[in-house]
Image (cartoon, rainbow, N blue to C red):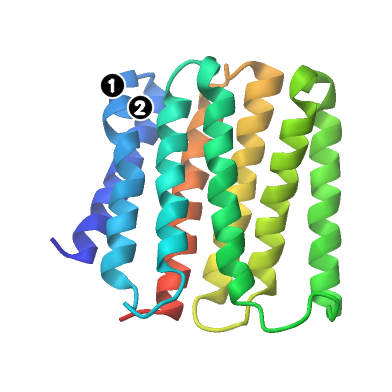
Amino acid sequence: FTMSFFKIAYFLSALAVVLGGLLEIESLTIVFKPLLMPFLGLFFFLSVNPNYNSTKLILLALCFAFFGDVALMFSSDYFILGILFFLITHVFYALVFMKEIDQKLIDLNPSQIFVVLLFLVLYVLLMMFLWTSLNDLKVPVCIYGLVLILMGVLSYFRKQKKGYYTVFFGACLFIVSDSILAINHFLYESSILWAQALVILFYVLAQYLIVCGLVKNNDR
């Protein structure tokens, strides 16, 4: 099997999951959603430079994303567990991005300050929007949101090398995907079918762009 095989398998599996959500064919989700991260992980492993020093962190991020995918397939009883797994995924990605920053965080340029402020404003607006629906989950959701925003900001702070904007755009799509998931789950009790399809669509694109951008910067 080649890296191209696993990339094609990843997107075909993603298409099946999106269609499963739109057409309410649960079997498609059950069969293909658990395959997403293994396919992407194998694509990454076969594509990246063996000397890349963040390979283990990225594979761990994909591993916990796999656990999150599986947990979120089942009833809402496992929602918090799934979110915990994705929180760990974002922490691993943040650690990867931190290793690729070559400046002190206090030496921010105007564009970086703008991005930090923009992400914080979006975070506050989303929390205000969700607040009355969070009930006992206010603190966990706030923490998750902060880690998610931190991951996005750190992706922007990376050295602007090959694949830089691919990674940043992927991180932004991850934020969009998680925001739609939160709105659909807490405000609409996961009842909007097209929202679930959008979550998966943005999620698979986000994961691929992050991984692909890191591969571009550290290919074989």
Q: Which residue is mark 2?
A: 20
Vertical placement of residue 96 versus 141, above or below: below
Q: Residue at x 33, y 56 (%)?
A: 41
The answer to which image quadrant residue 48 occupies is: bottom left
Residues at marks 2 and 1, CA–CA distance in whole angstroms: 7 Å
Callout 2 touching callout 1 (CB < 8 Å):
yes
User: x and y percent of residue 190 in the render?
Assistant: 58, 20
Q: Amino acid at mark 2?
A: Gly
Secondary element at image label 1: helix
In the image, what residue occupies the spot 29% across and 41% down? 35
Q: Residue 193 versus residue 123: which sits nearer the camera?
A: 123
Q: Amino acid at mark 1?
A: Ser
Q: Quadrant of the N terminus?
A: bottom left
Q: Which mark is residue 27?
A: 1
Quadrant location of residue 125? top right
Placement of 13 over or under 131, stated as above or below = below
Q: Can you give x and y, in whole percent of width and height, for residue 107 in the image?
A: 84, 81
Q: Nearer the viewer, residue 21 or 78?
A: 78
| Residue farthest left in this picture | 1
- Residue 84, given in percent of the width and then of the height, sits at 58, 36
Total marks placed: 2
| Precedes in sequence: disc 2 or disc 1 | 2
Q: Label 1: few (<14), some or many (≥20) within 10 Å?
A: few
Q: Is residue 123 above or below residue 53?
A: above
Residue at image x 83%, y 26%? 131
- Say if 159 sits above or below 31 in the image: below
Secondary element at tag 2: helix
Q: Position of residue 173 (x, y in %)?
A: 58, 52
Question: The C terminus lies in which quarter of the figure?
Answer: bottom left
